Image: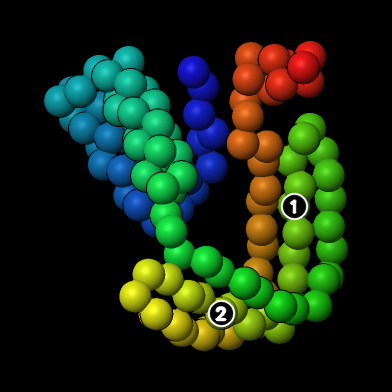
Amino acid sequence: MAYYELYRRSTLGMTLTDALDEMVTNGELTPSIAMKVLAQFDKCMNEALSSVKTKTTFKGNLDTYRFCDNVWTFVLDDVTFTVSGPGGYKDAAHVDKLKIVACDGKTGDQAGAASKK
């Protein structure tokens, strides 16, 4: 099963990529092993985030949006987040600008099988 590589651009993903690049450059790791580590990272991030029970809502002003290759991209200005989670946890935050990239949760063979039903 293929997993989205979106989280490679997160702080954690970029740090992992930098560390792997350094290890490959120093001859401590082969490029194929580094790619396997990144593939495992993609899988773990997708699986870990699929079980999160926290609810987040946000409200802001839509600046731009785009739909290309089954991927939605939204850019919002003046965004307020409200987060609620288990045990009555609540919090709020504000950001000036937010970019959201949304992909179909079903990839490759899964999407094809779902459309045939």
Q: Position of residue 15 (x, y in %)?
A: 32, 49
Q: CA distance from mark 2 to mark 1?
A: 21 Å
Q: Position of residue 80 (x, y in %)?
A: 63, 82
**Can residue 70 be seen in this snapshot?**
yes
Q: Is residue 90 above or below residue 22?
A: below
Q: Is residue 89 above or below residue 26?
A: below
Q: Identify the residue position indicated by label 1 in the image.
A: 73
How many residues crowd around disc 1 within 10 Å: few (fewer than 14), some, or many (20 or more)? some
Q: Is residue 55 above or below residue 47?
A: below
Amino acid beneath label 2? Thr
Q: Is disc 1 placed on a helix, strand or loop?
A: strand
**Can residue 14 be seen in this snapshot?**
no
Determine the image quadrant of residue 115: top right
Q: With 36 as the anchor, is 59 left or right in this view?
A: right
Q: Position of residue 111 (x, y in %)?
A: 69, 22
* Residue at x 50% of width, y 76% of height: 83
Q: Identify the residue position indicated by label 2 in the image.
A: 82
